[in-house]
Image: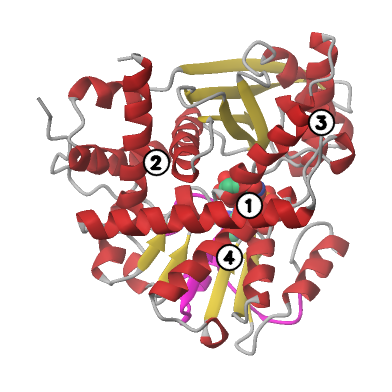
Amino acid sequence: MTVKYKEPAPIKDHLNPLESMMERFSVAAEILGLDESTYNALKSPEKSVAVSLPVTMDNGKIEVFEGYRVVHSAKLGPSKGGIRYANSVHIDEVKALAAWMTWKCAIVGIPYGGAKGGIKCDPRKMSQGELERLTRAYTVAMADVFGPEKDIPAPDMGTNPQIMAWIMDEYSKLKGVASPAVVTGKPLVLGGSLGRVEATGRGVMVTARSAMGKLKMNPSKVKAAVQGFGNVGSISAKLLELQGVKIVAISDVSGGYFNDKGIDVEKAIEYVEKNGGTLEGFTEADMISNEELLTLDVEVLVPAALEDQITLKNADKIKAKLIVEGANGPTAANADAILNDKGIMVIPDILANAGGVTVSYFEWVQNRLGYFWTEERVNRRADRIMKQAFEQVFNTSQKYDVNMRIAAYVNAIDKVASTKRIRGSF
Ligand code: NAD
C-alpha cells in the first residue's frame, strides 16, 4: 500500500536544508508510489557520527571543535561527500547534504552512496598550523568511518586540496599503507586528477548550455549573475563567459559587484588571488548587495555560495529565466512553487553541481588503477555524463509533467530504491 506523504503543511517562513530536502523527497516519493517502509528507510541516514576535537591553538590554549560525518546511504557503493569547515555547520545541514550526495551520485550514475562531513569552525581565522592539527584530529576520530572502499571525503566550502592532503597523509599513517583513494580533490602531486578543480563549475556550464538549448537561448545574447566567487562560482563564471555569456554580476562574502557592460572574469579571478581570496575593493564594477544580485535583470542566475538564498522573501522578485544551482540547497523548498509559477527553469543542485563528484569518481578510479588520464579525457567523459544526466532528468520532467527538481529526485530515488530492493535490504 502506498501512502500519501505530501501533507498540506502550513507554509513556513523558514525551512532548514533538511526540511527543504524532505519536502522534495516526499513529492517525488508520492509520484513513484513508494511504500511506507521504503520511504522511511531512504529518509534516514545509515550512520551519523559526532566527535569533539581538542586542538592546541597557536596561543597555547586548547579549543574543542565539533565535527560530524553522516553517511546517508552506502547501497550504491562506498559513500562519497565533501567536508565543510564553517561556523554555520549543524548536524541537520550535514544530514541534508549527505542525502543530496546520495541523490546526486544516483543521477549521474556513478557507483557511490552519499555522505557529508563538517567541522564547526571559521577556517579564515585559523593559521595553517591550527587547520592542520584540526584536520588530523578529525581524520583520527573518523579513521573507522573513512576508507577507500567505505567512505571517501572530498573538499567543500572552507576546505581545499591541502586539507585533503593532510587527510590522506594521516589516514595512510594510521593504516600503515599508502591510501590515496581514501580522499579526492587532492593536489596533483599526491594523486589528484587533472580537471578536478574545475569540474563542478564545468558541470554548471555544461548543464546551463543544455538548458539554454531547450529554452532556445543564444548564449551570446545572455546576461548572467553569479553569486559566490569561490571554486564553483568563479569557474562557472569563467566557463560561461567562454561560451559567450556576459557575466554582469559576481559576488562573495564581501558583497556584490555589478557591471552592465560585462565583468572580465579572468581579471576578477586574478584580483581575488592577489587580494587574500576576496573581491573586496574590486573596482571594475559597482558595488551591490548579495540580495540585489539575485534579483537583477538577467537571463541566467547561478547561485554558487550557500544554502537558503532564494526564499519566500525574494523568489517573486527574481527576473532570470534559468537558475543553475551551483551551490547545494540555494533555494528553500517553500520558494519552489513561486519559481514554478513564474515559469523559471531551475537546474537543481543535485544535477547542476554533480560534475564535482563525477570527476572525484574519476580521481578514485585513477588512484586505484595507478594510471592517470589526460585533462582532455577527464573533461570529455565528465561532459558526456553531465549531458546524459541532464537529458534523463529533462525526459522525466516531461513524462510526469513536473519541474526539473522533482524530476531529478524521481530519477535518483527510483534508482536507490530499486538497488536496495535488488540487494534485499528492505
Ligand atoms: P568556496 O569556499 O570555494 O567558495 C564559497 C564562496 O561563497 C566564496 O566566494 C565566499 O566568499 C562566498 N560566500 C560566503 N558567504 C557568502 C554570502 N553570505 N553571500 C555571498 N557569497 C558568500 O566554496 P565552493 O567549493 O565554491 O562551494 C560553494 C557551494 O557549492 C557550496 O554550497 C558547496 O556545497 C557547493 N558545491 C561545491 C562543490 C565543489 O566541488 N567545490 C561541489 C558541489 C557543490
Mark 3 nearby-residue class (10 Å; few <14, some 14–19, many ≥20): few
Q: Is residue 55 above or below residue 89?
A: above
Residues 414 and 250: in front is 414
Query: Residue 381, which numbered label?
Result: 1
Q: Is residue 249 above or below residue 102?
A: below
Question: Label 2 sits on what residue type?
Answer: Asn
Tell me how far mark 4 sits from mark 3, CA to CA: 30 Å
User: Which quarter of the figure is the C terminus placed in?
Assistant: top left
Give yes or no for contact between labels 4 and 2 (Cβ–Cβ under 8 Å).
Answer: no
Give yes or no for contact between labels 3 and 1 (Cβ–Cβ under 8 Å).
Answer: no
Position of residue 166 measured from the top left corner of the image (x, y, whole percent): 82, 28
Tell me how far mark 1 sits from mark 2, CA to CA: 35 Å
Q: Which residue is mark 2?
A: 16
Element at badge 3?
loop
Which quarter of the picture shows residue 134? top right
Specify the segment rendered in magenta: 282-310
Nearest-to-viewer mark from 1 and 2 = 1
State how the image is colored: secondary structure
Which quarter of the picture shows residue 92? top left
Is tag 4's residue or tag 3's residue first in the polypeptide sequence? 4
Is tag 4's residue or tag 1's residue first in the polypeptide sequence? 4
Residues 423 and 282: in front is 423
Query: Residue 219, which numbered label?
Result: none
Camera sees residue 190:
yes
Tell me how far mark 3 sits from mark 2, CA to CA: 42 Å
Question: Label 3 sits on what residue type?
Answer: Gly
Query: Residue 370, which numbered label?
Result: 3
Is tag 1's residue or tag 2's residue first in the polypeptide sequence? 2
